[in-house]
Image (cartoon, rainbow, N blue to C red):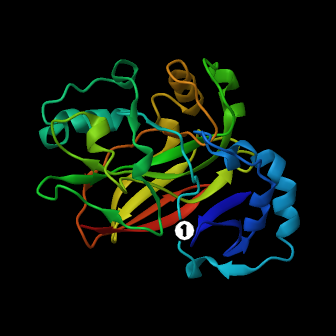
Amino acid sequence: MKLARFNDDRLGLVLGNELVDVTQVLTHLPRACYPFPRHDVFIEHLAFLRPFIEQLAGNSTRYRLEEVSLLSPVGNPGKVVAAPVNYKRHLEEVLAQREIHHGNLIQEIQKAGLFLKASSSVIGCGQAIELVHTDRRNDHEIELAVVIGSTCRRVLAQDALAHVAGYCIGLDITLRGPEERSLRKSPDTYTVLGPFLVSADELSDPSHLDFSLHVGPDLRQQANTSELILGVPELIAFASSFYTLHPGDVLLTGTPQGVGPIAAGDVLHARIDGIGAMSVRVSA
């Protein structure tokens, strides 16, 4: 199942090149009152909602994908947990280029740990990346994004995939400089998720996915998730040893070699096997 959020917070089921409006299914969500849940209640109840979504798909309004503006497939991520230097060749690339690390201490992921990105930085591919501090280098980073489906704490790697709701493409836009990663990677629009949420049952093995990123016609990044230093199960186990992971939390798994600068007017084209492709504009 592929699900998308579009236009004015509508919910759609993706069928080929069409999107079926199944927003009505949200009426089955439990009512909430203040203080509101800090996690994504739609992702939490996705398994319960699935038969209602399938029922609505037969007689609801359809759109061509190119007709709609795609939002982040996760509407309320409680937190975005990101993995630095989780591809060996990217670690080598960062160490070799001072304009990337600016003298910051760079270590392999087992020592560097993880970092958090502000949930306010999340957008969908129908929106634009709006660069800040354009006197400095802003870079693209493509990553496999894992969406947590059920609460877990101190989960073992062999049990971790049972807690995954699905996957999407992630773009971790990065402002280079001497500050902490979380500051430089959390400006508004600096986390792009899309184009849809592909449910875990449709993408059962995230460990052998080809992916690539072009800026305009130029190929910048190309790799396979088999090259991850810590794979998806190990990353979930690592993250859950520090944080309780809740439905809708997003885990960015790391970017491979080939990171490079972007500027206003660029268009980023990202693709991951089993998920799809998306294009995102860059403005300033």
Q: Is residue 203 visible?
A: no
Q: Is residue 278 above or below residue 29?
A: below
Residue in the foreground of this view, choosing between 26 and 137: 26
Q: Secondary structure at mark 1?
A: loop
Q: Is residue 46 visible?
A: yes
Left or right, 39 with respect to 136, comes to right
Query: Where does residue 140 sit, x and y in percent of width and height?
Result: 32, 54
In which quadrant is the N terminus drawn? bottom right
Residue name at image x 40 percent, y 58 percent? 213
Q: Is residue 258 above or below residue 59?
A: above
Left or right, 113 with respect to 126, comes to left
Circle 1 residue:
70
Residues packed near mark 1 inside 10 Å, few (<14), some (14 to 19) or many (20 plus): many
Residue in the foreground of this view, choosing between 70 and 270: 70
In which quadrant is the C terminus drawn? bottom left
Residue name at image x 32 percent, y 37 percent? 182
Count up the numbered dots.
Answer: 1
Q: Is residue 215 above or below residue 174?
A: below
Residue name at image x 51 percent, y 22 percent? 238
Residue that sits furthest to the front in the current view: 34
Left or right, 193 with respect to 97, comes to right
Query: Where does residue 166 sit, x and y in percent of width and height?
Result: 65, 46
Q: Quadrant of residue 152?
A: top right
Q: Quadrant of residue 89?
A: top left
Residue in the foreground of this view, choosing between 71 and 29: 29
Query: Where does residue 33 sit, x and y in percent of width and height?
Result: 67, 44
Query: Where does residue 18 sit, x and y in percent of width and height?
Result: 69, 76
User: In the image, what residue type sits under mark 1?
Assistant: Leu
Left or right, 178 with respect to 74, comes to left
